[in-house]
Amino acid sequence: MDITAFFLQTRTLTKNLCKPLEIEDYVVQPIEEVSPPKWHLGHTTWFFEEFILKKHIDSYTVFDPEYSYIFNSYYESLGKRVARSNRGNMSRPSVIKVYEYREFVTKHLEALLTNHPSEEVLKLTEIGIHHEKQHQELLLTDIKYILGNNPLLPVFNPSLVEHPIENQEQEWISIPEGVYEIGHLGDGFCYDNELGRHKVYLSPYQISNKLVTNQEYLEFMNDGGYEKFDLWHSEGWEWVNSHKINAPLYWHKIDGQWHHYTLGGLTPIENSQPLSHISYFEAFAFAQWKGCKLPTEFEWEIAATKFSWGIRWEWTESAYLPYPSYKKAEGALGEYNGKFMVNQKVLRGSSVATPPLHERITYRNFFQTHLKWQYTGIRLAR
């Protein structure tokens, strides 16, 4: 796809995702990890302005010099910024002003792209597009958390199929021991944390062709899975007890029946649906209960061509670490991935919220072990 068309398509999709929002929804931030929709709209715009327009258009004047402070996320090299936990405290700039900012930056970058852009501009634009795609998924899951913590549990977008059922019978796919190559290959887009293709040795293993379902997890819950300390890591057991965790996120027991909040409102749990909104702690405990394990990210990548994936981000047993020849990019973009390679677990695949043209087998997502507001699920190995 032409880079200009790809850019404009991406910008339009972000705007369309926000169409069902009420104006009051744009600023809410229930927890630090969840950013307000208005902030996502501004931050993805700031990224293009900061990394491309300011550096590659001599006559460019920023829309508002204060926006760099407001919409910078974590780039220390680009100056001070609003604390992440305070993003929901900013009633200004208004939503209307942020949309004006988006249009301003979009028009300037479109003009730059249609006027013989340099290779560097093209490369940075591609990164910016995929950065915005990441935020499209975060935007959707953050909106779900915002509305899912509203006592009215409002309907947002009933057309999104959040829980597509896998109809195949469960089978165990056998992978023989051997030395395998891991990492991105080819000329297509990837992030720097996927680069440095290298060899790993894998012992023989089996991996399920199907994700864990609600029914299987209900069996774990009904068997006292949340009360059996020996299934949990010590830190996970402390998390369960200190936060009184007894079910996946968005589950509500009403008149003896489990329901879950979806973007289409509150609905009864369907047993055959793939489990979602699970932390790594819970995924590990469930695997222990089943007498299985979570696959490593390498086991997942080698087997991924043999099963369907893309419904849930799948927890792996791998710590988020650099590949052997990993090199950070120069400048501020070097802060994109490398500095987060500690105290996180890798997730593989993609989810129902992942936007088009953004998924690939080598994609390395990562989150802290207690987080579960993304569409996270479980694929067992043994």
Image: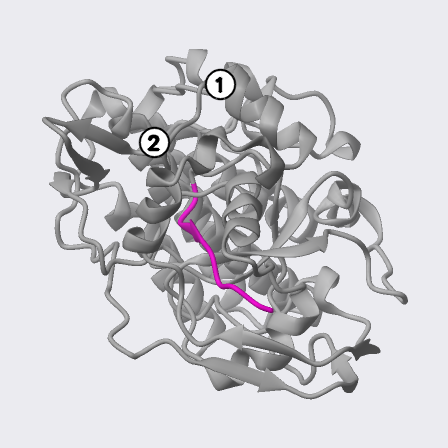
Can residue 143 be seen here? yes
Is the N terminus in the top left, top right, bottom left or bottom right quadrant?
A: bottom left
Gap in Å between the C-alphas at discs 2 and 1? 17 Å
Residue 136 lies left or right of residue 157; in this view the side is right
Q: Position of residue 258 (x, y in %)?
A: 19, 36
Q: Residues within 10 Å of mark 2 (few under 14, many from 20)?
A: many
Q: Is residue 295 magenta?
A: no
Foreground tag (2 vs 1): 1
Residue type at the position of mark 2: Tyr
Which picture quadrant has residue 9?
bottom left
Is residue 224 depicted above or below 286 in this figure? above
Q: Earlier in the sequence, mark 2 or mark 1?
A: 2
Residue 281 lies left or right of residue 275; in this view the side is right
Q: Which residue is mark 2?
A: 145
Which picture quadrant has residue 365?
bottom right
Residue type at the position of mark 1: His
Q: Secondary structure at mark 2?
A: helix
Q: Secondary structure at mark 1?
A: helix
Closer to the camera in the image, 274 or 139: 274
Closer to the camera in the image, 318 or 111: 318
Q: Which residue is mark 1?
A: 243
Can residue 58 be seen here? no
Residue at left offset 75%, top offset 85%? 177
Magenta stretch: dominant secondary structure: loop
Provide the residue span drawn in magenta: 374-382
Residue at left offset 64%, top offset 80%? 302
Figure coloring = one colour
Residue 192 lies left or right of residue 57; in this view the side is right
**Residue positioned most to the left:** 255
Is the C terminus in the top left, top right, bottom left or bottom right quadrant?
A: bottom right
Q: Is residue 379 magenta?
A: yes
Residue at left offset 57%, top offset 44%? 47
